[in-house]
Image (cartoon, rainbow, N blue to C red):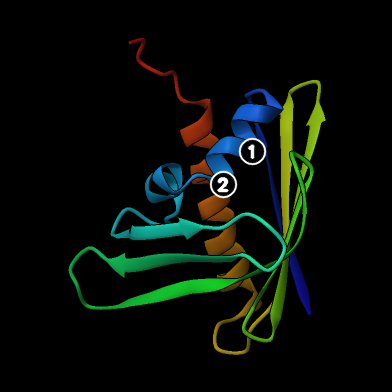
Amino acid sequence: MKITVSTVVAAPLPEVWRAYTTPADILVWNTASPDWHTTAATVDLRPGGRFSSRMEAKDGSFGFDFEGEYTRIEPQALIEYAFGDRVGLVRFEPGADGVRVTVTFDAESTHSEDQQRGGWQAILDNFARHVSAPRASA
């Protein structure tokens, strides 16, 4: 079964792409709830390149590595990756209101479809807030 989540990011496509693929940004937005955080992130954005995000509960009670390998990259358009025996696909589609970011992934059997959809949607919503947030000028 595949699950799809989506959001619109009110920012130019190059900025949305950069924030989605830059480890320093991933550390900020890659969380489903305020009691979790991402403590490390690596990105080798090319087919065959690896990625990893270390996600941990802030109280130290649990953590895991979300990692895999990029299988297809179309700059500022598409990222496809394998993680374990599952596949994920991220599409970036510019529109009048901003960039629609759509993530489709193979579901796993440990958590319900609603839990998975809710967690991935929360992360994507956090991403949209991060990229759309006003930046302090230097």
Badge 2 vs badge 1, beta-carbon distance below 8 Å: yes
- Is residue 115 visible in the rendered structure shown here? yes
- The quadrant holding residue 92 is top right
The residue located at (38%, 50%) in the rendering is 27
- The one nearer the camera, 63 or 14, is 14
Determine the CA span between mark 2 and mark 1: 6 Å
The residue located at (46%, 35%) in the rendering is 130
Residue 17 - label = 1
The residue located at (48%, 44%) in the rendering is 126
9 shown above or below 27: above
13 shown above or below 27: above
- The one nearer the camera, 97 or 15, is 15
- The amino acid at mark 2 is Thr
Q: Name, please, the residue furthest toward the top.
A: 137
- The quadrant holding residue 101 is top right
Q: Name, please, the residue furthest toward the bottom.
A: 109
The residue located at (34%, 60%) in the rendering is 40
Quadrant including the N terminus? bottom right
Residue 21 - label = 2
Q: Position of residue 59 (x, y in %)?
A: 18, 68
| Mark 2, other Cα within 10 Å: few <14 / some 14–19 / many ≥20 | some
Quadrant including the C terminus? top left
| Mark 1, other Cα within 10 Å: few <14 / some 14–19 / many ≥20 | some
Q: Position of residue 74 (x, y in %)?
A: 80, 48
Secondary structure of residue under mark 1: helix
Horizontally, residue 22 falls left or right of residue 76, namely left
- The amino acid at mark 1 is Trp
Q: Position of residue 123 (x, y in %)?
A: 51, 53
Count of marks overlaid on the render? 2
